[in-house]
Image (cartoon, rainbow, N blue to C red):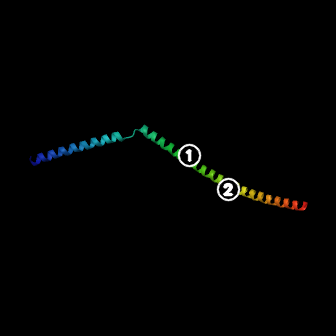
Amino acid sequence: MNRTEFVIVTAIILFVAFCLGWFANWLVHRFIRVPHSDVGELERMAQELHEAEETRDQAITYLQQREAELTNQLAQTEAELAATMEGLREARQEAEMMRIELEQARS
């Protein structure tokens, strides 16, 4: 094989490799390419996902506010209960003292 034949064979091999690469590239892009209808649907789904995330965030905020309100209300109720129990204890002690005084006065 002389020099000219070597150059021609090399050129043919490189051209065939180029054609195969171009064809492979075309096939890959043909199968990967997303149709316009799918792009629209993907955009719609992305918008719905965004709205769902906003709704979730609003629900979480509402639940946190509601939990804080209920915790505050529970603390107030417990404080009122403690005050009522203390008042009841004092009333019972006062009633016991009056009963003792009444029994002493009768005797």
Q: Position of residue 22 (x, y in %)?
A: 27, 43
Relative image position of residue 68 (x, y in whole percent): 63, 54
Q: CA distance from mark 2 to mark 1?
A: 30 Å
Residue 75 in the image, given as x and y percentages of width and height: 67, 56
Mark 2 vs mark 1: in front: 2
Mark 1 packing: few (<14 Cα in 10 Å), some, or many (20+)? few
Asked whether the beta carbons under mark 2 and mark 1 sit within 8 Å of each other, the answer is no
- Marks 2 and 1, the one that precedes in the sequence: 1
State the residue in front, 43 or 87.
87
Judge left or right: residue 56 versus residue 85.
left
Q: Which residue is mark 1?
A: 55
The residue type indicated by label 2 comes to: Ala
Q: Secondary structure at mark 2?
A: helix
In the rendered image, which residue does mark 2 sit on? Answer: 75
Relative horizontal placement of residue 60, taking residue 72 as reference (left or right):
left
Quarter of the rendering occupied by the C terminus: bottom right
> Which residue in the rendered view is the most extreme toward the left?
2
* Residue at x 32%, y 42% (from the top left corner): 28
